[in-house]
Amino acid sequence: MHDELRQLTGTILVTGGMGFIGSNFVRYLLREHPAARIVNLDKVTYAGNPRNLADLTEEPRYVFVQADVRDGEALGKALTAHGVDQIVHFAAETHVDRSILGAGDFIRTNVEGTQVLLDAARAAGVRRFLHISTDEVYGTLGSSGAFVEESPILPNSPYAASKAGADVLARAYHVTYGLPVIITRTCNNYGPFQFPEKFIPLMIVNAFRDVPLPIYGDGLYVREWLHVEDHCRALARVLAEGRPGEVYNIGSGEERTNLEVVREILRLTGKPETLLTTVKDRPGHDRRYALDHAKLRRELGWAPAIPFAAGLRQAVEWYRGHEAWWQEILSGEYRSYYQQQYGERTA
Ligand code: NAD
Ligand code: TYD
């Protein structure tokens, strides 16, 4: 079924399209918006995986450009050569734990890369610049309440701080230059093609391999979980009908403690709770995130459609059916990362 609301047309530059959400979004656009063309610009870092879109090599509405978002010349060329008129900016360093090990790449890609891309967008005169941000820019919550779009920006991790820098830069380009920027801030996504350093896929692949499932601290940290397919549908809606200069929260209302999620993964994989291991906590660990997404519901008529229970079951089945995809990741750089991240924690 095509989205019954406005169809996207023109040429959309997607940055970071070889990553988790970006690759799902490219697929979503090709399927649901047959009049849109896509240019995927990605540096292909450890998190970018050409296999995520390997089946698209013959697709006439899709082009891949390997480049760094900090490379203004490459951006200018790609925007002009392909007649890009809209940008959806996903490319980023995205893992909080890696940002704690070292923030340099996060500042370079997330802050500087966004600035270079915003300048290229201005020069090209695009009609939409959709900037993908995160609930983590708002900081942390106590046991009740939810962030609204006007909540203060109080990031706590180097990752969140770098995303906040990008977010406010994008806003400033709208105010200063009239660039048609729209910002979305979403909660924790999950689903197919998520790199197994993130919580849900890490726990699923560890469970399949009978490797301990490392829970940080007391495991009572709360995250709000959104299926990536619901997120992609929201983004297409915002790109088509959102108002420039506005911020839209994209949430699901599906809040869970980490322990609840892991117990469910163990049940779905048929593995014992003895695999569950408490490890040293993450420094500066945000206790709870929750988004109020009433604005998106009210203005654009979007609502999440995939309940967490069904979405998690589907995700577990996807990882069960794509062992070659994650085994290949586990055999590379991931091994030294895992040792560095978890070796000391579990010692
Ligand atoms: P990911 O880590 O899976 O993918 C990031 C992609 O960006 C990779 O393909 C990588 O190669 C590319 N990239 C990194 N640096 C680049 C550079 N300098 N130039 C060009 N490409 C580069 O990330 P994701 O989980 O898909 O997240 C996508 C976006 O959504 C990010 O901006 C992230 O901050 C935001 N976000 C993600 C979540 C989540 O739960 N995954 C939640 C909120 C917001
Ligand atoms: P993560 O996927 O890193 O997302 P974020 O920190 O950006 O929300 O982590 C989600 C939650 O899971 C967070 O509270 C940290 C916790 N966590 C663990 O307990 N163990 C792990 O091995 C990882 C990666 C995360």
Image (spheres, rainbow, N blue to C red):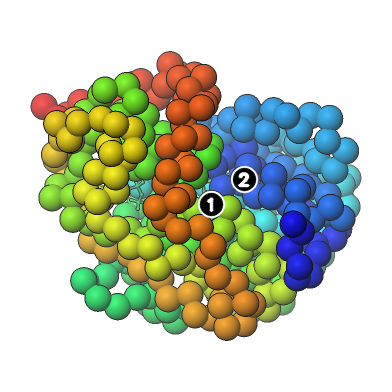
The percent coordinates of residue 325 (x first, y second) are: 52, 24
> Which numbered circle lies on residue 74?
none
Mark 2 residue element:
helix
Q: Residues within 10 Å of mark 1 (few under 14, many from 20)?
A: many
Q: Residue at x 37, y 29 (%)?
A: 205
Look at the numbered disc 2 and say if its residue's Cβ is closer than 8 Å to ligand 1. yes
- Are the residues flagged by discs 2 and 1 in contact, CB closer than 8 Å? yes
Q: Is residue 35 above or below residue 15?
A: below
Give the answer, above or below, for where 8 lies relative to 19: below
Q: Position of residue 323 (x, y in %)?
A: 48, 22
Amino acid on which the number 1 mark rests in the picture: Val
Looking at marks 2 and 1 on the same chain, the residue that comes earlier in the sequence is marked by 2
Residue designated by label 2? 24
Q: Whole-percent x and y of residue 115?
A: 60, 57
Q: Is residue 189 visible?
A: no
| Residue nearest the observer in this picture, 204 or 223 | 204
Question: Does the image show residue 268?
Answer: yes
Q: Residue 121, percent across and down?
A: 74, 59
Secondary structure beneath disc 1? helix
Q: Is label 1 within 8 A of ligand 1 (CB to nearest ligand atom)?
A: yes
Position of the C terminus, as image quadrant, is top left
Question: Viewer-proximal residue, 75 or 221?
Answer: 221
Q: In the displayed structure, does residue 15 sit left or right of residue 320?
A: right
Identified by mark 2, the residue type is Asn
The quarter of the displayed image where residue 201 is located: top left
Q: Which residue is mark 1?
A: 228
Residue displayed at 22% across by 36% down: 214
> Where 345 falls versus 331 (above or below)?
below
CA gap, disc 2 and disc 1: 7 Å
Quarter in which the N terminus is drawn: bottom right
Q: Residue at x 37, y 42 (%)?
A: 200
